[in-house]
Image (spheres, coloured by chain):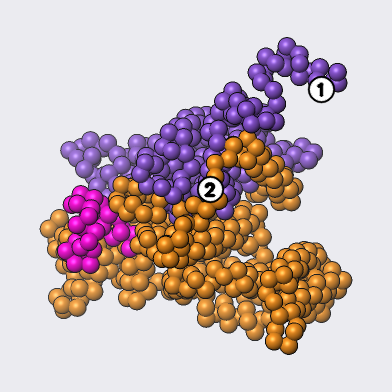
């Protein structure tokens, strides 16, 4: 649907001018670094020339933004990209699959993408993509909301922290392999806290205060109309840090998505030190020595927490429908949802029809396949895993610890499993007993 | 004698700072032991343990943001009355009338930032394996602090009493009525409602407890205000104290063994 708002305005161009100017200075600094360290091509031209060219283009782009009017402005995300992107790539299935693929790539290609040059290129690609996308009105509406700005910042900060982790971990993994001391063990003399730590803290506080004041002046805290219990906004969203949980409501009923799963997340986090029996990797960054623990945690934090918050904040619009990043949040967008319970699959498949009746035995009979499946998943699967794939874990953990551990893993897996079942078979509930509010 | 020396030699100055300025090794040690605010720290520390690339400084930043929230929060309390009549208009006046007023902005952005820095602190602690023995229990306290940080932010979200506030809390608190056994739309609550006694109703379930009513209203505002300004900060302060104390007792910032 078209909207009457222009994609480009004078103030947007000024803002983007500053954005590209910042990018120019970043890459100018990088050019200097490259000139010092990267050497020359075989014909004697310094490799930094490539970066110098790129930086000068950025400077010209910046100047172009500052000087030209919005009419006939040439640099913007083309519709030839935006429309197909929204139409074919914007759905929860692809989003989740891509985030899983990205997660897998992040771990298996960690030696490659943490190289400074590679990660610098990746950072530039994402910033240019962001800059071009900001020329779209609907994209700005979502990303530029004052409450959403910290989430955009969080994305870059989390990416940066993950980069630090993998860079240090790759380095330490190599050191351990070669029998050299860890990075953390080199240059590790004792120093006095005054001045070495106290000054760091002081500078940190000053910088943070400056950031907060600047942030507070630049962006006004939102204040909408006075609260009214009769005018329901569409979409109604929880605070942003709970939007991953709200996204789970698509796949689970509130008692699971809003109560049981959050409790298990917190209980599981508290249980971490008591089920991780691995003594290595205490007090330094490493990956290989604790690949399973780290991969599990990263999987929980990145695709299942951060990515779902981004999905819930930026991509879920009215009626909790999925919207592409350049798409107008149309209240009238209709998405067909025709989901079927497991009991219907089962009994209709048998040809006998779903058992009717509201007495306890009829309900239990109706839901028997799902109930057996759930019992099998949480009660039978752990012992089987304990004597097969996770045998070494079982041997080292003991019964109680292993049961807690395997159940937590299974709880964590239940969300991706339910997502896949929903997308593949339009499955609504595995166990569906609305009479008792007991739907899984 | 310069003015500076005169002040530093006065009885008043010496009663506050009981030793010379920390310019030499001895006094740099003494200052850590005699200053209340500094005695949180050890006297000396491993160089890599305080490297920014190792700690990311996220725990310290979180604590600093907590202090910022406390200070700006107290200032905001002077302007704000938690009643249906005034809550929204006090915030509106704060925005429209106060020249250069950015206390609310700092409070809100600081709160968002604090949620993020808590996560990043946990991220770092996990990735360096710092929850491993002997620091298991401090990790547990950390998780409790995470919950309380989210609750602080959640309760504060309601106070401006605009559309954004009351509907976010409505969406969030609707989960409570699906609590197993304790919510009117949760599985198993019928167990308490047998033989004619209705123990779990929409006037007695978990959501009612959270909101102080059947829906987000005046009682909720009062409840969230007290939780936000008094109850949770008190608990958080206590847990922060234990958290810091245990960092020291459990061997300081984690390092390779």
Residue A180 location (% of width, % of height): 45, 61
Q: Position of residue A202 (x, y in %)?
A: 67, 39
Work out whether disc 1 and disc 2 sit on a shared chain.
no
Residue farthest toward the bottom in the current orientation of the protein: A43
Point out the image quarter for the N terminus of chain B.
top right
Please name whichever residue, B163 or B255, is drawn nearer the observer in this view of the structure: B255
Q: Residues within 10 Å of mark 2 (few under 14, many from 20)?
A: some
| Left or right relative to A323: residue A361 | left
With respect to residue A74, does A134 lie above or below? above
| Residue segment shown in magenta | A385-413
A394 magenta-colored: yes
Q: CA distance from mark 1 to mark 2?
A: 38 Å
Chain letter tied to orange: A
Nearer to me, A21 or B203:
A21
Whether the residues at callouts 1 and 2 have beta carbons within 8 Å, the answer is no
Q: Residue A328's spot in the image, x, y percent?
A: 61, 70
| In front of the other: A109 or A412 | A109
State the mark number for residue B4.
1
Which of discs 1 and 2 lies nearer the camera? The answer is 2
């Amino acid at each position: 649907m078209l909207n009457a708002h222009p994609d480009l305005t004078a103030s947007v161009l000024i803002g983007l001018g500053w954005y590209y100017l910042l990018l120019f200075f970043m890459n100018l600094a990088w050019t200097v670094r490259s000139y010092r360290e990267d050497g020359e091509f075989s014909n004697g031209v310094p490799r930094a020339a490539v970066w110098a060219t790129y930086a000068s283009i950025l400077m010209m782009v910046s100047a172009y933004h500052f000087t030209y009017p919005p009419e006939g402005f040439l640099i913007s995300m083309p519709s030839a990209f935006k429309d197909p992107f929204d139409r074919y790539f914007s759905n929860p299935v692809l989003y989740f699959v891509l985030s899983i693929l990205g997660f897998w790539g992040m771990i298996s290609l960690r030696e490659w993408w943490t190289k400074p040059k590679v990660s610098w290129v990746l950072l530039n690609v994402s910033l240019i993509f962001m800059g071009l996308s900001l020329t779209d009105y609907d994209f700005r509406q979502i990303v530029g909301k004052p409450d959403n700005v910290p989430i955009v910042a969080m994305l870059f900060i989390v990416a940066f922290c993950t980069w630090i982790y993998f860079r240090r971990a790759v380095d330490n993994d190599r050191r351990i392999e070669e029998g050299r001391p860890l990075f953390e063990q080199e240059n590790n003399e004792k120093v006095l806290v005054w001045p070495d730590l106290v000054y760091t803290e002081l500078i940190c506080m000053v910088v943070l205060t400056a950031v907060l004041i600047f942030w507070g002046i630049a962006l006004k805290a939102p204040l909408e109309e006075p609260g009214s219990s009769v005018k329901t906004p569409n979409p109604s969203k929880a605070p942003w840090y709970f939007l991953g949980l709200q996204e789970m409501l698509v796949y689970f009923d509130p008692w699971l998505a809003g109560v049981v799963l959050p409790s298990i997340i917190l209980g599981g986090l508290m249980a971490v030190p008591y089920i991780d029996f691995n003594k290595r990797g205490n007090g330094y960054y490493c990956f290989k020595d604790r690949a399973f623990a780290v991969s599990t945690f990263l999987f929980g934090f990145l695709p299942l927490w951060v990515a779902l918050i981004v999905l819930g904040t930026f991509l879920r619009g009215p009626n909790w429908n999925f919207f592409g990043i350049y798409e107008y949040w149309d209240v009238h967008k209709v998405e067909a949802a025709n989901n079927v319970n497991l009991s219907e699959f089962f009994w209709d498949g048998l040809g006998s029809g779903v058992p009717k009746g509201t007495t306890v035995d009829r309900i239990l009979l109706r839901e028997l396949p799902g109930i057996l499946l759930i019992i099998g998943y949480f009660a039978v699967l752990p012992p089987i895993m304990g004597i097969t794939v996770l045998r070494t874990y079982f041997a080292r953990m003991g019964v109680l610890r292993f049961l807690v551990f395997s159940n937590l893993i299974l709880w964590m897996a239940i969300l991706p499993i339910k997502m896949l079942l929903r997308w593949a078979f339009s499955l609504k509930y595995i166990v569906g007993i609305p009479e008792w509010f007991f739907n899984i | 004698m310069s003015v500076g020396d005169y002040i530093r030699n006065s009885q008043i100055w010496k009663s506050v700072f009981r030793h010379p300025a920390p310019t030499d090794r001895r006094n740099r040690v003494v200052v850590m032991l005699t200053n209340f605010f500094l005695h949180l720290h050890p006297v000396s520390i491993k160089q890599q343990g305080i490297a920014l690339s190792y700690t990311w400084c996220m725990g310290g930043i979180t604590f600093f943001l907590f202090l910022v929230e406390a200070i700006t929060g107290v200032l905001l309390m002077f302007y704000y009355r938690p009643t249906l009549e005034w809550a929204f208009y006090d915030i509106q006046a704060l925005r429209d009338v106060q020249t250069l007023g950015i206390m609310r902005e700092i409070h809100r952005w600081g709160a968002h930032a604090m949620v993020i820095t808590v996560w990043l602190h946990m991220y770092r602690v996990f990735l360096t394996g710092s929850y491993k023995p002997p620091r298991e229990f401090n990790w547990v306290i950390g998780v409790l602090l995470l919950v309380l940080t989210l609750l602080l932010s959640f309760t504060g979200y309601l106070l401006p009493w605009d559309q954004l506030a009351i509907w976010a809390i409505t969406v969030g608190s609707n989960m409570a009525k699906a609590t197993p056994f304790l919510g009117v739309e949760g599985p198993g609550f019928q167990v308490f409602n047998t033989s004619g006694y209705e123990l779990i109703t929409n006037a007695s379930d978990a959501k009612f407890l959270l909101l102080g009513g059947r829906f987000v209203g005046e009682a909720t505002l009062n409840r969230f205000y007290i939780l936000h300004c008094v109850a949770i900060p008190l608990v958080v302060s206590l847990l922060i104290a234990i958290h810091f104390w245990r960092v020291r007792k459990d061997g300081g910032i984690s390092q390779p063994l």
